[in-house]
């Protein structure tokens, strides 16, 4: 990847006004969805009298592709628009907050936290920019609190992260394991056997990027959602309360693999890209991640490893709920942009069937756009077949996790479970503490009007199955 497109240093953040270190969470969302007239200012100036549009994204796996498409847009658009893309690092949420607080927000940005961005007034509604044809295309794809609020649309879906167990077939064969694991117990046993047979060659059974709390949720969230039919993200949709017992079995499995020495050494400080590099070199038997991996192993970390992706293991080997697809939101226009018309021209280009079809066919993501899916075309990139939607894959309704964590006292659930994986302790006490703190914060969020998501006694995650695909 071209490193100059990756901005992940603290200098980026410190260059912004320290006076705006916290965005005003009480800022009202945009009240009108009428098209505002663009104004021209210093931030919108570009060479040759063009209107400059700033675009921020945290996505690294598709940076080269998007860079080439933006270069194409800059050369061919008839509206004198020039887009500058910045690929952020793990500090993306913080950088977005500081940018809005200091009035230096980009014109177009990836919406990785819809509910929070809406409450803070970061997004402009796009209803009046959309053509009738575009509205028809997306009419059945929009979700409340993921794309829309009270009839106003702020972002559209493009692709979804479909999560799988990714494993090296040759490593499994060398360890004498015929099939990838379907249960958590089988995963623990396979990791141990792979390590016993491969350790002398630097090969270990399992890894996850535990440098951050994502090491736990990447490995566990899909497992939890597939193993029960009540919810995801620790949230029980039926009761309207948090219940982190859904992670108990996977937490114990990860803890056991650590105790067995089945994880790659140094996994505590491992980030996702170094993990991918190790997997590409044939040093990791299996890990859990999403559908960006085929593109990663084609372009970012080219590999000759004989790998594949299958459904994540569950507690008992059956899928009782649904395997979560993370998706629904993609990019939106900044409420602070003084060039919303130009920003929409770029956003419309990104959502065009031609760009989205090419994005899908090259394996950068699994499309959730009906016109792309119905085209009959499928990606041909190696490894993508294991990530194509199955009957058990589903998009869950919005839940109040992010809003709840905004006022949470103490550590977050993924941090608490990550600590358990490496230091042990009483998992039941950890779960009880998380339930108590999260539900107390949720009660405050509801009382203040920060969320209107409540219990749905009829919820059954298994009923979410089959809406994207009927393939077994």
Image: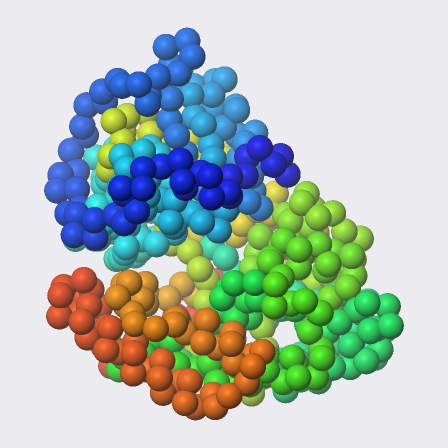
Rendering coords of residue 380 (x, y %): 66, 47
For the point 42% across and 21% down, the residue is 82
Q: Quadrant of the N terminus?
A: top right
**Count of marks, rendered view:** 0
Rendering coords of residue 161 (x, y %): 50, 57
Classify 391 as above or below 30: below
Q: Quadrant of residue 468?
A: bottom left
Residue positioned most to the top: 48
Q: Quadrant of the C terminus?
A: bottom right
Of 100 and 462, the residue lying toward us: 100
Q: Decide if residue 294 is on the left or right side of residue 376.
A: right
Of 124 and 316, the residue lying toward us: 124
For the point 61% across and 36% down, the residue is 3
Of 42 and 148, the residue lying toward us: 42
Of 151 and 212, the residue lying toward us: 212
Colour mapping used in the image: rainbow
Classify 246 as above or below 354: below
The answer to whether residue 193 of the structure is visible from this angle is yes
Classify 9 as above or below 400: above
Q: Decide if residue 251 is on the left or right side of residue 35.
A: right
Q: Quadrant of residue 445?
A: bottom left
For the point 58% across and 78% down, the residue is 422
Q: Decide if residue 428 is on the left or right side of residue 241.
A: right
Rendering coords of residue 29 (x, y %): 17, 46
Rendering coords of residue 13 (x, y %): 41, 41
For the point 62% across and 34% down, the residue is 2
The answer to whether residue 463 of the structure is visible from this angle is no
């Amino acid at each position: 990847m071209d490193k100059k497109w990756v901005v992940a240093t603290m200098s980026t953040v410190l260059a912004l006004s320290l006076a705006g270190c916290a965005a005003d969470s009480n800022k009202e969302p945009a009240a009108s969805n009428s098209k505002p007239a663009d104004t021209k200012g210093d931030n919108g100036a570009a060479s040759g009298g063009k209107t400059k549009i700033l675009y921020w994204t945290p996505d690294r796996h598709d940076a080269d592709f998007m860079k080439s498409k933006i270069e194409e847009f800059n050369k061919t658009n008839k509206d004198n628009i020039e887009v500058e893309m910045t690929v952020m690092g793990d500090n993306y949420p913080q950088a977005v907050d500081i940018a809005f607080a200091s009035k230096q927000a980009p014109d177009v940005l990836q919406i990785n936290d819809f509910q929070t961005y809406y409450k803070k007034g970061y997004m402009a509604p796009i209803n009046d920019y959309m053509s009738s044809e575009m509205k028809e295309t997306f009419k059945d794809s929009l979700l409340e609190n993921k794309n829309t609020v009270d009839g106003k649309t702020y972002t559209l879906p493009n692709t979804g992260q479909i999560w799988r167990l990714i494993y090296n077939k040759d490593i499994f064969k060398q360890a004498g394991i015929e099939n990838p694991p379907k249960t958590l117990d089988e995963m623990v046993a396979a990791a141990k056997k792979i390590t016993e047979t491969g350790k002398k060659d630097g090969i270990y059974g399992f890894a996850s990027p535990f440098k951050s709390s994502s090491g736990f949720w990447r490995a566990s969230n899909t497992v939890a959602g597939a193993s029960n039919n009540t919810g995801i993200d620790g949230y029980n949709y039926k009761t309207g309360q948090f219940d982190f017992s859904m992670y108990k079995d996977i937490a114990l499995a990860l803890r056991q693999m650590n105790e067995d020495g089945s994880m790659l050494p140094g996994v505590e400080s491992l980030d996702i890209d170094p993990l991918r590099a190790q997997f590409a070199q044939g040093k990791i038997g299996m890990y859990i991640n999403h559908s960006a991996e085929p593109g990663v192993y084609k372009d970012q970390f080219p590999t000759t490893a004989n790998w594949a992706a299958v459904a994540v293991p569950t507690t008992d080997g059956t899928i009782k709920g649904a395997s979560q697809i993370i998706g629904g939101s993609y990019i939106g226009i900044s409420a602070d942009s003084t060039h919303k018309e130009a920003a929409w021209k770029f956003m419309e280009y990104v959502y065009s069937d031609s760009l989205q079809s090419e994005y899908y066919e090259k394996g950068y993501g699994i499309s959730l756009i009906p016109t792309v899916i119905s085209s009959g075309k499928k990606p041909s990139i190696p490894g993508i077949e294991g990530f194509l939607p199955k009957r058990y894959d589903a998009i869950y309704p919005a839940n109040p996790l992010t809003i709840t964590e905004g006022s949470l006292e103490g550590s977050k659930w993924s941090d608490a479970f990550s600590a358990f994986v490496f230091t042990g302790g009483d998992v039941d006490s950890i779960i009880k503490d998380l339930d108590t703190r999260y539900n107390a914060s949720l009660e405050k969020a509801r009382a203040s009007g920060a969320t209107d998501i409540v219990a749905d006694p009829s919820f059954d995650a298994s009923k979410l199955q089959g809406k994207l695909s009927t393939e077994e």
